Image: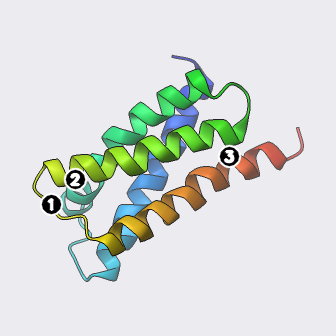
Amino acid sequence: MRTRTVSTLAIDAVVVVVFAAIGRASHGEDLGPAGIATTAWPFLVAVVVGSLLGSRLGGDQWWRQGLIVWLVTAVGGMLLRVASGTSAAPGFIAVGSVFLAVFLFGWRFLARRRPA
């Protein structure tokens, strides 16, 4: 695995963990590692797949990579969440999808805009 792919995956994983922590904090839920992991794991699994697909299929275009990662992470994470017996209310789907879009696209946009 290339160093760039590992770095990209690491940033994407941080986005997912922050997403889970903010969500848990906003609902007054446990912010310990086990609590965050309970919320984050479906999205972490999906973001690994999405990041790998994005690096392979997105070419050098940040927006294509971001689109692939976002779609796989949002849809895959929600499906894994539901499959594991946890709810995915429409509000959670909307807020989660928007958060993931902003941050999975956002860091890529900023990274491409910085001077070399």
How far is the residue under mark 2 from the one under mark 3?
26 Å
How far is the residue under mark 3 from the one under mark 1?
30 Å
Tell me which label, 3 or 1, sits earlier in the chain: 1
Q: Residue at x 55, y 57 (%)?
A: 101
User: Which residue in the protein does label 2 denote?
Assistant: 81
How far is the residue under mark 2 from the one under mark 1?
5 Å
Amino acid carrying label 3: it is Arg
Viewer-side label of 3, 1: 1
Q: Tell me where residue 88 sits by quadrant.
A: bottom left
Asked whether the residues under the numbered discs 2 and 1 touch, taking CB atoms below 8 Å apart as contact, a structural biologist would say: yes
Q: Position of residue 108 (x, y in %)?
A: 68, 46
Checking the image for residue 86, the label placed there is 1
Checking the image for residue 108, the label placed there is 3
Where's the C terminus, which quadrant? top right
Name the residue furthest front. Answer: 90
Q: Tell me where residue 106 sits by quadrant.
A: bottom right
> What secondary structure is found at the residue carrying circle 3?
helix
Q: In the rendered view, would you say 49 is above or below 21?
A: above
Is 33 displayed left or right of 93 in the figure? left
Q: Nearer the viewer, residue 43 or 9?
A: 43
Is 84 displayed left or right of 92 in the figure? left
Q: Position of residue 112 (x, y in %)?
A: 79, 43
> What secondary structure is found at the residue carrying circle 1?
loop
